[in-house]
Image: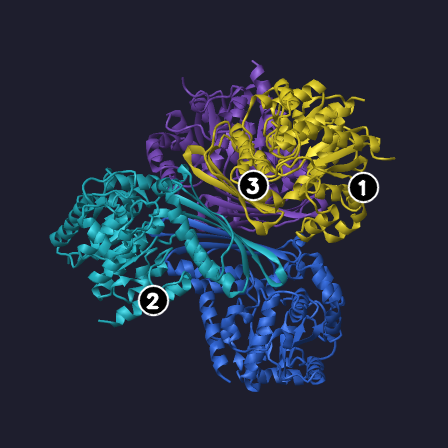
Chain colours: A purple, B yellow, C blue, D cyan
Amino acid sequence: MAPKTGLWFIGARGSVATTATVGALALTAGLTRRTGCVTDLPEVAVARPPGVADLLIGGHDVAGDSLPKRAEALADGGVFGIELARAVHDGLTRVDARIRHGVASTDPHEPSEGTQREAVEQISRDLAGFRAAHALDRVIVVDVATTEPPVAMTPELSDLDALERALAAGESPLPASSLYAYAAFRAGCPVVAFTPSPGPRLPALAQLAERVGLPWAGSDGKTGETLVKSALAPMFATRALRVRSWASYNLLGGGDGRALADPVTVTSKTETKGKGLTELLGEPVDGPLHIDYVEDLGDWKTAWDMVSFEGFLGTKMSMQFTWQGCDSALAAPLVLDLARLVARAHQAGESGPLGALGFFFKDPAGDSGHDLAGQWRALTEWCGRLGGDR
Amino acid sequence: MAPKTGLWFIGARGSVATTATVGALALTAGLTRRTGCVTDLPEVAVARPPGVADLLIGGHDVAGDSLPKRAEALADGGVFGIELARAVHDGLTRVDARIRHGVASTDPHEPSEGTQREAVEQISRDLAGFRAAHALDRVIVVDVATTEPPVAMTPELSDLDALERALAAGESPLPASSLYAYAAFRAGCPVVAFTPSPGPRLPALAQLAERVGLPWAGSDGKTGETLVKSALAPMFATRALRVRSWASYNLLGGGDGRALADPVTVTSKTETKGKGLTELLGEPVDGPLHIDYVEDLGDWKTAWDMVSFEGFLGTKMSMQFTWQGCDSALAAPLVLDLARLVARAHQAGESGPLGALGFFFKDPAGDSGHDLAGQWRALTEWCGRLGGDR
Amino acid sequence: MAPKTGLWFIGARGSVATTATVGALALTAGLTRRTGCVTDLPEVAVARPPGVADLLIGGHDVAGDSLPKRAEALADGGVFGIELARAVHDGLTRVDARIRHGVASTDPHEPSEGTQREAVEQISRDLAGFRAAHALDRVIVVDVATTEPPVAMTPELSDLDALERALAAGESPLPASSLYAYAAFRAGCPVVAFTPSPGPRLPALAQLAERVGLPWAGSDGKTGETLVKSALAPMFATRALRVRSWASYNLLGGGDGRALADPVTVTSKTETKGKGLTELLGEPVDGPLHIDYVEDLGDWKTAWDMVSFEGFLGTKMSMQFTWQGCDSALAAPLVLDLARLVARAHQAGESGPLGALGFFFKDPAGDSGHDLAGQWRALTEWCGRLGGDR
Amino acid sequence: MAPKTGLWFIGARGSVATTATVGALALTAGLTRRTGCVTDLPEVAVARPPGVADLLIGGHDVAGDSLPKRAEALADGGVFGIELARAVHDGLTRVDARIRHGVASTDPHEPSEGTQREAVEQISRDLAGFRAAHALDRVIVVDVATTEPPVAMTPELSDLDALERALAAGESPLPASSLYAYAAFRAGCPVVAFTPSPGPRLPALAQLAERVGLPWAGSDGKTGETLVKSALAPMFATRALRVRSWASYNLLGGGDGRALADPVTVTSKTETKGKGLTELLGEPVDGPLHIDYVEDLGDWKTAWDMVSFEGFLGTKMSMQFTWQGCDSALAAPLVLDLARLVARAHQAGESGPLGALGFFFKDPAGDSGHDLAGQWRALTEWCGRLGGDR
């Protein structure tokens, strides 16, 4: 039986999308284990989402290297074995043929051509064409493109009607991530915002999702240091230990590291990273948060956190941790999880921000806290409900 | 109004009991903050347990140094400030006057005098005398004495009737921790097992608690490395990351460290420390677990854990953490929490092992998993029920 | 016998000077051990420098709190025991009476009064008065004041004659640290620059030292992370291991931390910290270097370094270290060492930058590399020569 | 020009020998850089040792897998790239053809056949045959076989004449590593002991080396945690900081890890690892030292050290480091270095233990301390002398 769910990447030749594509092909061919696939844990699988083999992958990108070449480069960097990259070479070539040239770059330094209204039409055509050509039930658009710098709020970004008027007038008010989200919603596609870029989170976009009755999830995948924080901070809170400072240092190379070396762009990330701690601990906590680009680390990132806390009778103690992970290998299975779960939500008729998916995000949209265990409970309860709903 | 709840320490002049006593006096006098006091968090306070000021402290010990002297030594070691130790000097002297010489040492190398039946009678008299002299509603017996080596199971330890026969025959079948628990139950006192010693966990003792309708809690306070493990391991499990090995190294000085330097005694601790991980991760995990005595560390302990795990497509990653804490400052508030919550359970008529208190223990008795967030939920739900029950 | 060597602190009530003064008094009274005193190791003592008991301490400061009060605050922060602070209370009061109000602040935000020529005369009078009043053989001026921001080079700072003309004309061309160094040299006093402030390192000042035939040493005491770097980097170099990146993160509180929280001032420090690595490794190395102010750490600093290196056949490996030290306790004995050794050099008739003292500095003046073992050899050889020279 | 120096491995198909062989072939073919090759640093190259391309490799082993197969397994484990293993496949096959079946296993659980006298004759014949067949100037025997358990000293191991009598009488008094060293010396070959096994270090063997006028070097390659210790400990010593405890934890997998999982064998290693610290610090230091086998780590090892030290005025501070290295990639270039430098020493007519090579060893034989910088100086001075001696 042919796949019924489309997975459309914005940034389809980036490290995360390439790794997710390699992984989806490898899982479908039975070449690897389901390690890292949250959706295949029994508590989540109960929701009966589409399987990895049910996903047909396509996408937009503005970069030139083909997927098989990108996969070889990632294998060189140790993200996965070169044998695996070769075993799925043909599948990668087929996915690569389904990648359309992006009409808008998320890199603000690259100017776009034409009006945003034209770009929307082009993107929507690409999405509708993909759905029709493969007789897909639905297409989930997942943004894994380079992180954008933060945007200043304007009336067009805050209000859907103002946005529509501006687009009709030939203006270009949207950041690229939100342009893609706009076009996706207009084409009837649910959206996943896996980066801290604005995407569907702008009020005008959220209104659009509500108006067209589509679900979306975001934002900024929780893959490493923030994941650990959201598991550890509740320990301090429920033990009534007072965190005095929490210093967070992140070293990373790769494409994402290079984008984040930009002192403006990086604030998109440090903001989503910082948000949760205050909520988790119940009060603001002192301490620096740095993200540093170190080219030699490639796709690997190392984070060191130092937590200084106070216990009974004011005794000062500390905890530190070092996290050494492969960014793409951590992110890729979550991207597949999200596509599958958002597809299931769409099938079940849900709309608006999916708070139950907060488990996957640094800056969860919808009704979700930052506490990992609480997010897990919310996710599994939601999956249980979806599973009961036939 | 005079305190109504007795807190009776086995090991009343040890580091944990001394710190707890200093803390209780300091809190009652308003000299310190409630940092570390779980029972004063709103979700737990809802159960309406007695306050710290409602606790009257006494206990058994076999050691000679007075509480004020012990407090000064701990202040020297940085557990709390010397000013605080001096400010509660008079209170410590009063508690010290309520400490009775223990009839049995938990140190297996120190022989006891007389039969265990005589010892039971002496301990029960001490407990009943304490309760009567101060018109207390109830007395909670909390074992914070030196860890004992593991015991070999015998019919007397497995079955209450066999135990009663042996005691009647003048035999001494019980390890000291269980002797104290036996006497406490016979005197109508609930018991808290804060060490890995057998105490109330022997089947014969658990039967006794059931027969006399008394609650008890245990065992082995979860204060440091195991606490962190129980917060972190669920993160790996719910993210479907496969933990390949988890190495745990513990350095500690102090009295507890010295006892654990004994290669037999230490197995009591390494066993309770190791138990949770398999359950938390769903499969046995390779990796050494050492506890090493380093005299110079005094009451401070440092733990280093190295977690090697596998993610998507078999990519190997790792996480390590270092925990630098003060053992007594971590344990002391939990001891007060447990006394207050067990007193509340006794008042509410609960009996048997209190599974809802698993949050506090490495090796929780009763119906409780090891997952910290799950234990917190169980605790707060129980507290909510107790709070509704007037 | 009365002390014969004056030790005059610029910043005499700062954390480092206070700790050094407490230490000098405690050592003289036999209340503490010589831990941390390099000059008392046999290989250095061979130079026959004055003993700690031979030092008479005075100084300048602009701050108000008395030395005994400052010492109590440091004891509160755990730098040394409160008992020790009390035991030397009277000695501290006597030193405090010898502290003169500084005519110039090293804080650039505090304007000075009068011309720099007047300030020089005042400082020189203070120094000469101190020497005369106590019949001292010599006075060593040691700058431990707050770090200044970097200065832009000007003709007056580059050339002694231009500087003299500017001062004569009533101008104020010098940063405060160099003003003190200028006055010290004019008063015949050797100088130690223990901070990264310009002090005696400006070309005009170095010319002055040469002209008046006085020795000086600097700059920026090597007390923690950089010390470790200078011990570790040669290991990589002599093993032909290629360091790919070296990330350095520093967390510190205290007064120094606050000054370094200023984004301009901190560059004084990051520059001296960064200088050595390139020389030690033979090539520039990538990697961030941050100094972050975390108030709660007080006088304690934590540094975390992550070294990524490549071995045989291109294999990537890594090393990380965490250094948790007390800034003042690390710096204070070095300050006493430097006063004693510079006094000995002065006695022996040496002049100009003392390269043999590079062992003590992050940014060594004179002919010295950064390699710790090489610096130790240079130091001990110099001491051997001084010892033979009677 | 054909190679003139033979390099004969005991344990020729082990991880270290295989990596060294792959590396020698890759360097000769210009496929990799000289990273990790100490002998190619200018200060050492001045001695004019043979080049890597001048080495012809052969050896003994008792294991079955061929070198090309072993190389592929190591590439799988990330020690080097699979492309490199394939590029030197033919060279590996040629070396493999020069590997003779070992007549004695260093594994004490595998019984040997025949008398040790016969084994000596067989080994000597193999060595002489290798030298003759390839017209080599000399053959250096390098022991990289599995670590043996410690031996109890006997008269035969202490005295050469007693040993000769025992061998003549058909007895088998020698541990395998020493049997190979004996045969090597008898065949006129210098020896390098790269493991902690007794090898040439037994007094009887050292006497033999002296009698036949051959040089040897050992023992136990200093590749990781001990290397770092020998760079760091002098820092504490020369700064007069008192180390209070130094805890050392080592996690490793691979073949070496498995051998060291044996509680007796591991003492060979913990002893050589522990020896240096006391000397480096000038006094014995408390603290545990563990080596734990964790299968999943493969050829990678992680060490964590925690140094607790005391500074000025008794202030307690600490430093910890984590070393994550690839055992074979660290050891292999040193093995090539040692073969080249011992060949040069042999050519220059040196005999007995080569103290100048202490830089490479955990337990240096001959006149050498443990201080890494001092060992580097001794090495480079020796190289300078050899270079001047034409």
Q: Nearer the viewer, residue B82 or A376?
A: B82
Packing grade of label 3 (10 A; few <14, some 14-19, many >=20) is many
- Disc 2, disc 1: CB below 8 Å? no
Q: How many marks?
A: 3
Residue projecting furthest to the top:
A390
- Please give the label number shown on residue B260: 3
> Which part of the image, by quadrant, shows the N terminus of chain A?
top left
Discs 3 and 1 lie in a common subunit? yes
Q: Residues within 10 Å of mark 1 (few under 14, many from 20)?
A: some
Does residue D4 lie above or below B70 as drawn? below
Chain letter of mark 2 equals D
Kind of element beneath mark 3: helix
Q: Which badge, 3 or 1, is on the more N-terminal residue?
A: 1
Judge from the rendering whether residue C99 lies leftward or rightward of residue C271; answer left or right: right
Where residue D48 sits: x, y (%)?
Answer: 25, 65
Mark pair 3, 2: CA separation:
48 Å
Q: Which mark is residue B294?
A: none
Residue at 50% across, 80% down: C386
- State which quadrant residue C85 falls in: bottom right
Closer to viewer: mark 2 or mark 1: 1
Provide the residue designation for mark 1.
B28
Task: Name the mark nearer the viewer: 3 or 1.
Answer: 3
